[in-house]
Amino acid sequence: MSKEQTIKELTIYDIISSFRSKIVEKGKTEFNPNIHITKPVVRLSPSRKYFTLLDVSYERVEAPAKKTAKPKPSGGGGGNVNP
């Protein structure tokens, strides 16, 4: 990242907001947002520009060796005993 880039270019999420509202007839009642606006929603969607990988190289590496499992001790483990 160069020093000239501003924070505005690095927005991580795009914000989309929406809401539903009830019709208020002119002159009958005054519009009250607490009463007449319903279902407010704010959606955050990841910015493609921020999450796009550029100038990336990949290399294959060997998987680490798996450890062998310890054998479980037999008997004395509790549980139901049938007489």
Image (cartoon, rainbow, N blue to C red):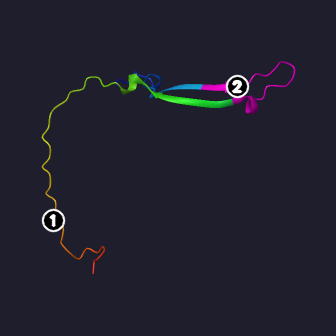
Q: Is 60 on the left or on the right of 49, as rendered?
A: left
Residue at figure coordinates x 37%, y 27% from the top left: 51
Let me know if residue 49 is in the magenta part. no
Residue 52 x/y as whole percent:
34, 24
Let me know if residue 24 is in the magenta part. yes
Q: Is 83 on the left or on the right of 49, as rendered?
A: left
Question: Residue 42 sits in which quadrant?
Answer: top right
Residue at figure coordinates x 41%, y 22% from the top left: 5
Residue 34 x/y as whole percent:
74, 33
**Residue receiving disc 1:** 71
Q: Amino acid at mark 1?
A: Pro
The residue carrying pointer 2 sits among few (fewer than 14), some (14 to 19) or many (20 or more) residues within 10 Å by Cα, namely few
The residue carrying pointer 1 sits among few (fewer than 14), some (14 to 19) or many (20 or more) residues within 10 Å by Cα, namely few
Question: Residue 60 sits in which quadrant?
Answer: top left
Question: Residue 17 sits in which quadrant?
Answer: top right
Quadrant of the drawing holding the C terminus: bottom left
Indicate whether 40 appears above or below 83.
Answer: above
**Residue receiving disc 2:** 21
| Depth check, front residue: 22 or 7 | 22
Residue 55 x/y as whole percent:
25, 23
The furthest residue to the front: 83
The furthest residue to the right: 27
Residue at figure coordinates x 70%, y 25% from the top left: 21
The furthest residue to the bottom: 83
Magenta residues? 18-37
| Depth check, front residue: 43 or 76 | 76
Asked which secondary structure carries label 2, the reply is strand
| Depth check, front residue: 28 or 42 | 28
Asked which secondary structure carries label 1, the reply is loop
